[in-house]
Structure formats: C-alpha cells, structure tokens
Amino acid sequence: MLLIGDSLSVVSTEENGVDIPSSFINQVVIKWESKVKDYEKYFQKSHFLF
C-alpha cells in the first residue's frame, strides 16, 4: 500500500489490491454478484415453454 502526500490517499498495488474491501474491483465484483443473484431468482420463478 502506498500513501501519497499529506492527504493519506491509499493507492492499491498488485500485491494487496484484492485484500482491500473498498477497492474499485471488489466493489464491481460485489455489485455484479448481487445482480447475478437477482437474475437467478427471477429465472427460477419463470417458466418457459418451448
């Protein structure tokens, strides 16, 4: 983890980026997983006739 300047801005590095819960990629994955679960619930309730 790198601290830049006096503002204490955290910049994730390759080694620790996955371990930071608030990192951008983790936020994207969490949001994506919740959308997938929503769609799975929807499709389980739906009945398709082919």
Image: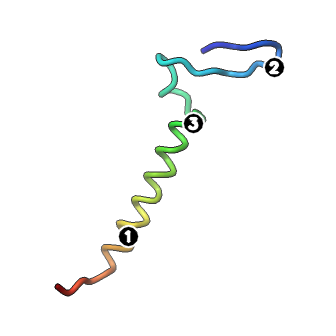
Q: Position of residue 9 (x, y in %)?
A: 73, 22
Residue pictured at 64% horizontal, 13% vertical: 2
Q: Earlier in the sequence, mark 1 or mark 2?
A: 2
Q: Position of residue 36 (x, y in %)?
A: 40, 59
Q: Which residue is mark 1?
A: 41
Q: Which residue is mark 3?
A: 24
Q: Which residue is mark 2?
A: 7
User: Do labels 1 and 3 touch, CB within 8 Å?
Assistant: no
Residue pictured at 38% horizontal, 74% vertical: 42
Q: In the image, 38: left or right of 2?
A: left
Q: Residue furthest front?
A: 50
Q: In the image, 42: left or right of 50?
A: right
Q: Residue furthest bottom?
A: 49
Q: Position of residue 43 (x, y in %)?
A: 33, 73
Query: Hey, what amino acid is under mark 3?
Result: Phe
Of badges 1 and 3, the one in the foreground is 3
Mark 1–mark 3 Cα distance, whole angstroms, equals 26 Å
